[in-house]
Amino acid sequence: MSAPQSSTPRPSAPAARSHRIETRLVQDGILRSPFGETSEALYLTQGYVYDNSAQAEARFKGEDCGYQYSRFANPTVSMFESRMASLEGAEAARATATGMAAVTVALLGQLKAGDHVVASKAMFGSCRYVIEEFLPRYGIPSTLVDGRDLDQWRRAARPTTKTFFLESPTNPALEVIDIEAVAEIAHQAGATLLVDNVFATPLWQSPLTLGADCVIYSATKHIDGQGRCLGGVVLGSTKFIIDHVHTLIRQTGPSMSPFNAWVLLKGLETLAVRVRGQTDNAAACAVALAEHTKVSRVIYPGRPDHPQAAIVRRQMRGGSTLVAFEIDGGKAAAFRFQDALRLVRISNNLGDAKSLITHPATTTHQRLKQAQLDELGISDGLVRLSVGLEHPDDLIEDLLAALAVV
Ligand SMILES: *Cc1c(COP(=O)(O)O)cnc(C)c1O
């Protein structure tokens, strides 16, 4: 069993890049113990014992391979990191306790007082909070732009701009941003590009190959996909991870629990099957919703009527497990619709095997002012549906029955 060195970059590059994604999701990154277990072992341990004092000294000096303490590294967490790196085509990965820990570490690791951030306005609520409210407290201002407008990215860059941040498709209106074009603008400005790839999933979009310097996930979403554990991961080149992420996680402690890493490893084994099934179901729901007279607008990356359909075709390999749509009649109609659903449950989570729906204006985006909601296309009638693995006909029957009472 090769125990990765804990004080230097861990070997998270895939052993066989030639294998296809489905194979890598099942096989890559396993550190098999001398017991020869089939399934990835759960190393639920805080610390590690040393054979002798000299070994302990050598390990702290980084001269001896092996683990020291699970805030720094843990074999189960290493397996998760290796498999994620292989899946993403990244040289290195570091796991974190939550997706927000991954975003925060990826930003703070690169930034210091006086630096500047450019970010797309349309993003997950907590990401917007970190950039808009939290970073300025440490002397790091930001400019928020309409991510679809490349000129706004260009104009926002300053000599002090260190990083660009975006998510695509965006939450909750599923706008799509041209990652390759924004990466080019970022690099011309001497900045890095960070992409939150949660909505696209690693199956349908690979931001590193489009020019991004760093990709982050909330593993809480499709990677678990069965509603159990929180988790996050930061991926990039070995240099990016060592310079910006490795030490910050070790010393400040947003580390992933080995138990969660183990659950997420098992989640990865079925990621491709689940995301494909959920995407097919979502596409079927989008068709049924688009035909309904009480639905004024359906936004689904993968439909030819999506506003950025050409970019979707260029940068994504599949549609989405999410559908956003607007119900005629505003908040009252949206609430009546959600409350009439029997199979689809009301929850702000997403990516789950169970179908979930939320009304962003009153939940995830409640903090925003009316003008900000308007800018983001979050109307009173907009709902965001995360499509699960139920039979699509049952889901469509549930959606149509609920629309009938609106
Ligand atoms: C959920 C989510 C996050 C935050 O992840 P947590 O695991 O909840 O901390 C960040 N970005 C996007 C797009 C998300 O959906």
Image (tube, rainbow, N blue to C red):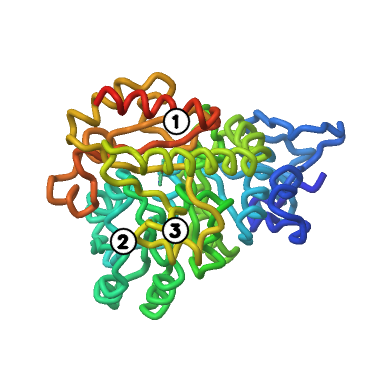
Q: Secondary structure at mark 1?
A: helix
Which residue was labeled with disc 1?
396
Question: Which residue corresponds to the image point at 28% horizontal and 34% vertical from the top-left?
Answer: 359
Residues 358 and 261: in front is 358
Which residue was labeled with disc 2?
119
First in sequence, mark 2 or 1: give its number.
Answer: 2
Image x and y of residue 158, in percent: 27, 75
Mark 1 vs mark 3: in front: 1
Question: Which residue corresponds to the image point at 78% horizontal and 40% vertical from the top-left?
Answer: 52
First in sequence, mark 1 or 3: give its number.
Answer: 3
- Of all residues, the one furthest to the bottom in this rendering is 188
Residue 376 can be seen, yes or no: yes
Question: Which residue corresponds to the image point at 49% horizontal and 51% vertical from the top-left?
Answer: 319
Image x and y of residue 268, in percent: 64, 40
The image quadrant of residue 226 is: top right
Image x and y of residue 396, in percent: 44, 30
Question: Which residue corresponds to the image point at 43% horizontal and 61% vertical from the top-left?
Answer: 194
How far apart in space, not on screen, are marks 1 and 3 (Cα)? 32 Å
Quadrant containing ligand 1 reads: top left
Residues 362 and 42: in front is 362
Task: Report how many numbered discs are placed on residues in the image.
Answer: 3
Residue 248 can be seen, yes or no: no
Which of the image's four quarters has the C terminus? top left
CA neighbours of label 3 inside 10 A, class few (<14), some (14 to 19), many (20+) = many
Q: Amino acid at mark 1?
A: Ile
Mark 2 vs mark 1: in front: 1
